[in-house]
Every structure is written in C-alpha cells, then in structure tokens.
Image (cartoon, rainbow, N blue to C red):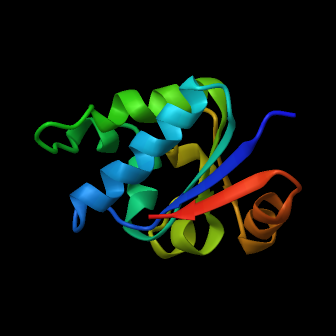
C-alpha cells in the first residue's frame, strides 16, 4: 500500500523558511511516489493564487512555484475554506487544480489508514 502524506502549511512570507520546508517535503514525498495532499492555510493560502508562488524568494531553496507544480502534478492541493473566505478567494481565483475544502475533509484525510499528517 502506498503511504499518504497530508501536509498542512500554515505560514507564508512572514515565516519563509517554515513555509518552504512544508512545500519541499510535500514535493519530495510526491517525487518519491507517496500520495500527497498539501493544505494551504493562513497566509500560505495566497500561494494558490497564480503568480504568488512565483514571487516567493528564499535563498538556497527550490523555487516555490516549482515545488507547488510538482505536488499538483502528483497529488492534491487544497486551500482551507475559512482561510480562503478571510482573503476573499474563490476557486476561480486559484491555480487550476487547486480546490477549497474545510476541516472535515482535512480530518478525514489525516485519519485515513496509512496516512501521516505533518504541519508546518
């Protein structure tokens, strides 16, 4: 059985290293063949908007946009419902393939058999 990683990134530009770590782990897990569900909450929700990940810069780190595309190609990316609403974001505002879902969906994914949840 392939393991599932559910990764929640809660930080954005205000904590760039923590933010990038979550994206890096998600992309590495996807590249390793794990099922990956990346959740963007808080300020990380902005990175689901086209152009925002491209503007993120952290020295000595892989480009956030490349990491995000790697996850989108092999897994799912979700923006928290409340986080999207607080930022005035609807699914039409997000990159293709990104969905909006709430806590019940996160809990269901995190509690699934064989899942490993990480929060950054």
64 vs 81, left or right, is left
Count up the numbered dots: 0
Q: Give percent across and percent down for residue 101.
A: 71, 61
The quadrant of the image that shows the C terminus is: bottom left
The vertical placement of 11 against 21, above or below, is below
What residue is at 34 percent from the left and 57 percent from the top? 19
The vertical placement of 86 against 17, above or below, is below
Of the pair 46 and 36, the residue shown nearer to us: 36
Q: Give percent across and percent down for residue 51.
A: 32, 37
Q: Give percent across and percent down for residue 8.
A: 55, 61
What residue is at 56 percent from the left and 36 percent from the top? 29
What residue is at 60 percent from the left and 23 percent from the top? 73
114 vs 23, left or right, is right
29 vs 48, left or right, is right
What residue is at 51 percent from the left and 47 percent from the top? 93
Q: Quadrant of residue 17?
A: bottom left
Q: Quadrant of residue 77?
A: top right
The vertical placement of 49 against 39, above or below, is above
Question: In this view of the protein, can residue 49 be seen by the observer?
Answer: no
Question: In this view of the protein, can residue 15 be seen by the observer?
Answer: yes
Q: Give percent across and percent down for residue 71.
A: 55, 33
The quadrant of the image that shows the N terminus is: top right
Of the pair 69 and 23, the residue shown nearer to us: 23
The vertical placement of 73 against 68, above or below, is above
Of the pair 97 and 77, the residue shown nearer to us: 77
């Amino acid at each position: 059985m392939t393991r599932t990683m559910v990764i929640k990134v809660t930080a954005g530009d205000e904590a760039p290293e923590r933010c990038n770590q979550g994206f890096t782990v998600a992309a590495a897990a996807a590249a390793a063949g794990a099922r990956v569900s990346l959740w963007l909450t808080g300020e990380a929700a902005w990175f689901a908007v086209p152009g925002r990940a491209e503007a993120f810069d952290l020295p000595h780190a892989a480009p956030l946009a490349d990491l995000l595309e790697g996850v989108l190609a092999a897994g799912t990316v979700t923006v928290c419902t409340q986080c999207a609403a607080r930022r005035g974001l609807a699914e039409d505002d997000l990159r293709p393939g990104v969905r909006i879902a709430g806590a019940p969906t996160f809990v269901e994914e995190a509690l699934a058999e064989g899942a490993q949840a990480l929060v950054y």
